[in-house]
Image (tube, helix red, strand yellow):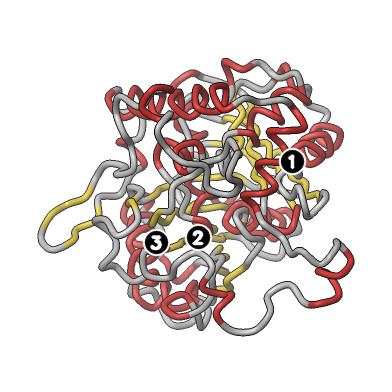
Amino acid sequence: MPDAVIVDAVRTPIGRRNGTLAPVHAADLSAEVLKALVARTGIDPGTVDDVVWGCVTQIGDQSSNVGRFAVLAAGWPEHVPAVTVNRACGSSQQAVDQAAHAVLSGQYDIVVAGGVETMSRVPLGSHRTTGQPYGPAAIARYGGSGFSQGIGAELIAERWGFTRARLDEFAAGSHAKAAAAIDAGVFDDHTVPIEVDGTKFTVDEGLRRGTSVETLAGLRPSFKEDGVIHAGNSSQISDGAAALLITTPQRARELGLTPIARYHSGAVSGADPITMLLGPIPATEKVLRRSGVSLEDIGVYEVNEAFAPVPLAWLAETGADPERLNPLGGAIGVGHPLGGSGAILMTRMLARMRNENLRYGLQTMCEGGGTANATIIELLR
């Protein structure tokens, strides 16, 4: 069975809600990273077997298979297909998994995986404006109160005894780490400038320098009157896209390309849909068991910062080294454009691995409904 390798990975800067990227349609934003992959690698886009594209809220601007229209917007040949997948916040990590699986099986030679979300144009919760998203049977099974990620985050904080001060300390750290990475130019090589109204947008927009426990103290709880979860220790509503080129080592050599990393192992798991956000814990256990790689062997852990209790609970349960957790900041510091976040996190993780010469990286994301992806990649150069 052939290996699946990542040849290149690119992303847009992350735009804050109603910020610089708000005027850009999701298909057009996606097209920018597709075009960048071609420009950077020199591949003929007509050789791409499929484009697997993550997107969560697939209505309005993001309906009608946004991945397919991204291919057309990029000017790629009409015969290049695309599919849009939805595993909630892990959609583009799932896209990477599916692309790797297709290459590993020998059915595809070259696949582009990634995703997009323009939350300024398609607001969070838009899917609730028509119909009943979860269905009466599932809602009834869990007590009839429905499913809320914010309440799930509150339940996690309560279960592990995380105080508001501890959560806010983690949130402030996310901003500080992201600021340090931006200032050091860690993201420069893989970030695609996006031109909007004649100006090139190059840097993640959600960063708030100087964020501290003290500055966060004035924010009101968002989900419970006496709760600990608020806008400052939750992920930011954002816009963004990312894409990775995945192929076999043999095909890469034929194209004159040097792979960055090997797709080592992947796993998905489910958890209680009320608490909802604990899926990364069993998903991590599963991928480690399958991979034969120990947690201690992994140099960087990217655990998506949907809410501060999520990576903190993951850390508490796994016993992982906190210094290796989200070293470049995360979604609290720079934003979480849902369907694009999995691929964005992977570009960031690859940057960390290459800068620090770390052999293994592990990425995991909590997802609506209680599912989670976990993926291990191995550095090759």
**Mark toward the start of the polypeptide (2 vs 1):** 2
Q: Nearer the viewer, mark 3 or mark 2?
A: 2
The x, y position of residue 72, in whole percent, is 39, 78
In the displayed structure image, the side of residue 288 where residue 122 appears, left or right: left
Q: Quarter of the image holding residue 199?
A: bottom left
Q: Distance between the residues labelled 3 and 1?
A: 25 Å
**Secondary structure under badge 2?**
strand
**Disc 1 target residue:** 265
Amino acid found under the numbered disc labelled 3:
Leu
Q: How far apart are marks 2 and 1 (CA)?
A: 20 Å
Q: Residue 79, relative to residue 305: is it above or below?
A: below
In the displayed structure image, the side of residue 275 where residue 52 appears, left or right: left
Q: How far apart are marks 3 and 2 (CA)?
A: 10 Å
**Disc 3 target residue:** 34
**Mark toward the start of the polypeptide (3 vs 1):** 3
Amino acid found under the numbered disc labelled 2:
Gly
Q: Residue 307, relative to residue 320: is it above or below?
A: below
Number of dots carrying numbers:
3
